[in-house]
Amino acid sequence: MPEYEPVIGMECHAELLTESKMFCGCANQFGGEPNTRCCPVCLGMPGSLPVTNRKAVEHVIRTALALNCTVASRARFDRKNYFYPDLPKGYQISQYDNPIGASGWLDIEVNGQKKRIHIRRVHLEEDTGKLFHTVGNESYVDLNRAGVPLMEIVTEFPPDIHSTAEARAYLMKLRAILTYLEVCDGKMEQGSLRCEPNVSLRPVGAAAYGTKTEIKNLNSFRAVQRGIEYELERQASLLNHGEKVVQETRGWNEARQATFAQRSKEVEQEYRYFPEPDLLPLDITPQWIEEIRASLPELPDARHARFVEQYGISNADAAQLTETRSLADYYEQTAGAADPRAAANWIMGDLSRILNAQSLDIANSPVSSPHLAVMINMIERGDISGKLGKTLLERMAATGENPQTLAQREGLVVLRDTVALEAALDSVLAENSAIVSDIVEKGLVNKRGFLVGQVMKATQGKADPRDVNKLLDEKLSRKN
Ligand SMILES: [Zn+2]
């Protein structure tokens, strides 16, 4: 069996964050009562005329600049003609040979290896409506999404991506950039970021590319990863049995964790592209480009490098904490008021576990960053133990309250009452006289840990182990 090299191209669609749709004044919002946000323009009524959304064009220019693309001085809209029930006009307004952005790149890192992924184009188009099929034999269409501004980002050919891990890293980085730019919310589960990888195999060392298939309906990072893995295995098995891969579009079945044949791929000519006669070309002046460039925020790679430098956290931690802008903002607010390394540990550990369990995003965290910083400082000062901190964080997430108030009220503070501590220690010593004599008379000092553990237990973990040890030393030396 020959060894195969995976060859992966990525086509991603991002719904843009604008007030209104691409060519009309209808609201651009997710969900809602079907067919309530439509007008003659986005329904494709005869005689209606489109007007370009300036904000959407700016979002695409922003993205093109952040992806190191050349921005066209003149871009044009074209009609992509095809019939489908979710497309009321019978064509989609898109961009064909004059996209807004071209020839860019972004950098990824997989297993410590940096790699540059080249981007062929970034263009602007409009989204289609949505079809719903009932269990019976009925289909419905919701056109609220029809005409929503949609940006398409396509990787360069020949592709740079040669593994599932690289495809995942590319998508993560792209989503990070889009959310930092605030051009797209990056929600794959709501379809505002959609990814269609095309996958093929060729024998290692071969010059010619194999036949590719495109995977659709991938609505999570995990689905993208599993979809590509499945397709690579399926194609390898076909090739190993002397069969051919058919060029086609394949859907992803989440329940079966498998791809299935949807339709054979249309060839480009069938779309009969031609310049959109109802819209003027987009003249993008150098001045407009420079204004947008000047407004770009700090991007993920720059922020990652700065986190390592400024906060002294590891490369891996910085990578994780800069994955989304809201996470990076949250970290930065916490690290500004508490120990940066402790902040990183709490956010990536216990807090992220709590948020995951409730399917919450960091932007909606019930624990605010100032509260988390206060809690970290309480641990630092020894007011509470790290172990109690975990309990306290759970209670903070449940109530949204200030950690100091909460710790006082719920008795989660360290036991500083030496009389109570001494009483607890005395009863532990009395109950374990055999162990005490082992330590005092036989010098079996390794048995001390047991006594400390018993005191911690007797005080429900509220004692400071340093206090217990100190007091135990005193007691034992007196027995000598
Ligand atoms: Zn409309």
Image: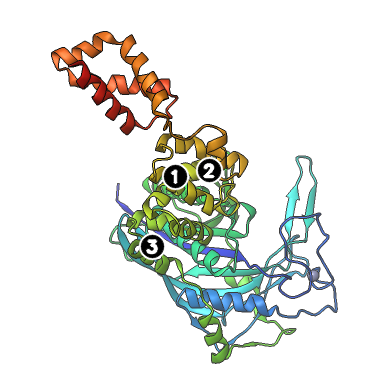
State which tag comes first along the sequence, 3 or 1: 3
Crowding near pointer 2: few (<14 within 10 Å), some, many (20+)? Answer: some
Image-quadrant location for residue 123:
bottom right
Residue 179 appears in the figure = yes
Figure quarter occupied by ligand 1: bottom right
Q: From the viewer's side, name the closer residue of 99 and 242.
A: 99
Crowding near pointer 3: few (<14 within 10 Å), some, many (20+)? Answer: many
Quadrant location of the C terminus in the rendered image: top left
State the residue position of label 3: 307
In the image as oriented, which residue stretches furthest toward the left? Answer: 442
Mark 3 CB near ligand 1 (8 Å cut): no
Q: Residue 471 placed where, x, y %?
A: 29, 26
Left-right relation of 178 to 445: right
Q: Residue 337 placed where, x, y %?
A: 45, 57
Q: Residue at x 53, y 49 (%)?
A: 371
State the residue position of label 1: 378
Q: Is mark 1 on a helix, strand or loop?
A: helix
Q: Residue at x 56, y 39 (%)?
A: 406
Q: How many labels does the image show?
A: 3
Between label 3 and label 1, give the one nearer the viewer. 1
Residue 404, labelled with which disc? 2
State which tag comes first along the sequence, 3 or 2: 3
Q: Is residue 478 above or below residue 464?
A: above
Of the residues shown, which amino acid type is indicated by label 2?
Answer: Gln
Q: Is residue 393 above or below residue 9?
A: above
Q: Is mark 3 on a helix, strand or loop?
A: helix
Q: From the viewer's side, name the closer residue of 12 and 475.
A: 475
Q: Distance between the residues labelled 3 and 1?
A: 24 Å
Q: Residue at x 51, y 81 (%)?
A: 293
Q: From the viewer's side, name the closer residue of 225 and 411.
A: 411
